[in-house]
Image: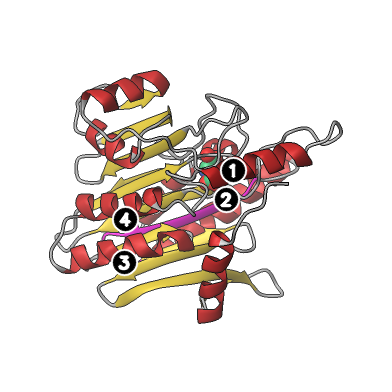
């Protein structure tokens, strides 16, 4: 049974392309790379790739990762600037025995040497967001990382049972230059083992890293849990742990899929969406909701929600 699951509605077009590839016996590596690249290339998604939101010095620094669940090979880039598709650079890095995680200038040098496409990733829209944010900031309200940061994180299984996981993000809006979150960090932002399954995260990287939450979900699946059960247990328990010890927990949303194409998702925030496609499910966007006793459930996104989503993403922006 093949399948692919991803954080956020923005992954829908990408996973739809991947679904077509997987249907025709495409492999999990190509399918996931294609899916992530589609998100990176779409300029209206302001937290991944082209159009991603900049750091406090108005530079777009991108993080990405790629993992092969058969060999456990990992490739990652942190804080890379001016390259179009960080996920492809991460995939390339995963093919080497060492030097798998490169940051900043070193990552750019590698990308240049291997002929990856250079591109100015700072769009006009992102500049407007930046300027408006600076304008809103007064002496009392110092520049704080923006909370609407969204990473695309995916897990994929192909018809032969090969699995992959990958992520891509511009990280937190207004982050310090050089800040790297969980997304390129194995076990935190992503993890996959073809013998079991994989998981990937979006949320406040600083907190996700404290619990290595993606690895924890894979570990629970290895003990026999269904992906849904594993996601709920890991997220609920770690959220509680953070609240007990630190008084608060950052946003944390995780998706997972096992090697049978079964999937799950858990979050500690309102408004999380994810996209999933399998051999028996057409590409679908779900919204995560909570009932009155705080129990999480999923609802398929309505046509109206989908239209509204795209309209708000592409609406003209005015510089304040
Ligand atoms: N996890 C990402 C980071 O901390 C951001 C996000 O997923 O929203 O860089």
Q: Which mark is residue 204?
A: 1
Residue span colored magenta: 250-262
Of all residues shown, which one is farthest toward the bottom? Answer: 303
Give the CA separation, mark 3 to mark 1.
Answer: 27 Å
| Contact (Cβ within 8 Å) of mark 2 with mark 1 | yes
Choose the circle earlier in sequence order: 1 or 4.
4
Give neighbour class at mark 3: few <14, some 14-19, many 20+ (Cα, 10 Å).
many
| Contact (Cβ within 8 Å) of mark 4 with mark 3 | no
Image quarter (top left, top right, bottom left or bottom right) of the N terminus: bottom left
Image quadrant in which you'd find residue 294: bottom right
Residue 256 vertical position relative to residue 56 in the rendered view, above or below: below
Q: Which mark is residue 286?
A: none
- Helix, strand or loop at label 3? It is helix
Taking the spot 37% from the left edge, 31% from the top edge, the residue there is 77
Q: Is residue 289 left or right of residue 10?
A: right
Residue 175 vertical position relative to residue 11 in the rendered view, above or below: above
Give the CA separation, mark 4 to mark 3.
Answer: 8 Å
Taking the spot 57% from the left edge, 50% from the top edge, the residue there is 252
| Contact (Cβ within 8 Å) of mark 1 with mark 4 | no
Q: Report which residue position mark 4 lands on.
A: 35
| Contact (Cβ within 8 Å) of mark 2 with mark 3 | no
Q: Report which residue position mark 2 lands on.
A: 252
Choose the circle earlier in sequence order: 4 or 3.
3
Depth check: give the residue in front, 116 or 65: 116
Q: Is residue 225 left or right of residue 260?
A: right
Q: Report which residue position mark 3 lands on.
A: 16
Choose the circle earlier in sequence order: 2 or 1.
1
Taking the spot 34% from the left edge, 60% from the top edge, the residue there is 14
């Amino acid at each position: 049974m093949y399948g692919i699951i991803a954080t956020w509605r923005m992954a829908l077009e990408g996973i739809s392309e991947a679904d077509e590839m997987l249907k025709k016996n495409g492999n999990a590596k190509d399918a996931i790379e294609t899916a992530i690249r589609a998100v990176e290339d779409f300029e209206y998604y302001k937290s991944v790739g082209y159009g991603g939101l900049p750091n406090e010095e108005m530079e777009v620094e991108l993080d990405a990762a790629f993992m092969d669940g058969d060999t456990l090979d990992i490739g990652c880039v942190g804080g890379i600037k001016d390259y179009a598709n960080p996920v492809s650079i991460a995939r390339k890095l995963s093919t080497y025995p060492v030097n798998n995680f490169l940051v900043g200038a070193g990552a750019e040098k590698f990308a240049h040497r291997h002929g990856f496409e250079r591109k100015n990733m700072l769009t006009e829209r992102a500049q407007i967001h930046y300027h408006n944010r600076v304008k809103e900031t007064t002496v009392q309200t110092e520049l704080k990382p923006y909370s609407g940061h969204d990473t695309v994180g995916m897990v994929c299984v192909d018809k032969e049972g090969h699995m992959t996981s990958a992520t891509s993000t511009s990280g937190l809006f207004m982050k310090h230059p050089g800040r790297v979150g969980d997304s390129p960090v194995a076990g935190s932002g992503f993890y996959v083992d073809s013998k079991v399954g994989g998981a990937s995260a979006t949320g406040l990287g600083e907190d996700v890293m404290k619990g290595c939450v993606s690895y924890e979900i894979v570990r629970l699946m290895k003990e026999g849990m269904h992906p849904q059960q594993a996601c709920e247990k890991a997220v609920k328990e770690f959220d509680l742990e953070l609240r007990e010890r630190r008084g608060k927990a950052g946003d944390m949303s995780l998706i997972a899929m096992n090697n049978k194409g079964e999937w799950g998702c858990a979050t500690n925030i309102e408004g999380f969406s994810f996209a999933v496609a399998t051999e028996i499910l057409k590409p679908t966007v779900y919204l995560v909701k909570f009932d009155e006793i705080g129990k999480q459930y999923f609802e398929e996104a309505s046509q109206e929600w989908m239209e509204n989503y795209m309209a708000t993403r592409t609406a003209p922006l005015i510089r304040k």
